[in-house]
Amino acid sequence: MDESNRHAAVGIQAEAKEKSLWELLPRIPCPVLVLRGAKQGALLSPEDAAKYERWLNHVTIQVFEDSDHEIWKPDRSRYLGALSSFLEQIDQR
């Protein structure tokens, strides 16, 4: 990223105001898969994962104990398998 783009991104972030969207999640009618890593560096906390459970009508949460935010590491096939399994379950409905 060149310096002008970085400067613009930093400025936008500095002026942004946080807005909660949790209360809009019940409007999502389709099943949702939430994948999260449990190691340090994961950005989705257990508390926020619980919020997804609370606010979404049809949610599956899967935790990869040995992953951080990059949930496809260390086992890419496990990650792809979780996605495939979830999609297959939806197709069976």
Image (cartoon, rainbow, N blue to C red):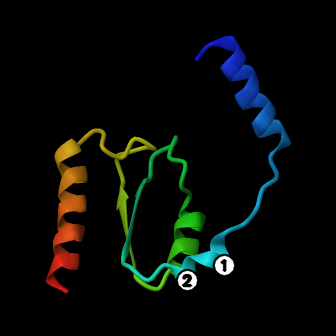
Locate residue 49 relative to residue 76 in the image: left or right.
Answer: right
Q: What residue sits 43% from the left and 43% below the top?
A: 68
Q: Residue at x 16, y 72 (%)?
A: 88
Query: Is residue 18 visible from the viewing direction of this image?
Result: yes
Q: Classify 80 as above or below 85.
A: above
In the image, which disc is placed on residue 93?
Answer: none
The quarter holding residue 63 reads bottom left
In the image, 83 versus 71, the foreground residue is 83
Establish if 1 lies above or below 82: above
Quarter of the figure that contains the N terminus:
top right
Q: Where is mark 1, residue-wise?
A: 23
**Residue type indicated by callout 2:** Pro
Pinpoint residue 31: horizontal percent, then vertical percent.
36, 77
Q: Position of residue 78 (x, y in %)?
A: 20, 52
**Res 54 visible:** no
Which image quadrant is residue 29 in?
Answer: bottom left
Query: How much space separates mark 2 and mark 1, taking CA atoms?
Result: 7 Å
On the picture, is 90 further left or further right than 39?
A: left
The circle on residue 26 is 2
- Residue 61 image position (x, y, % from top left): 39, 69
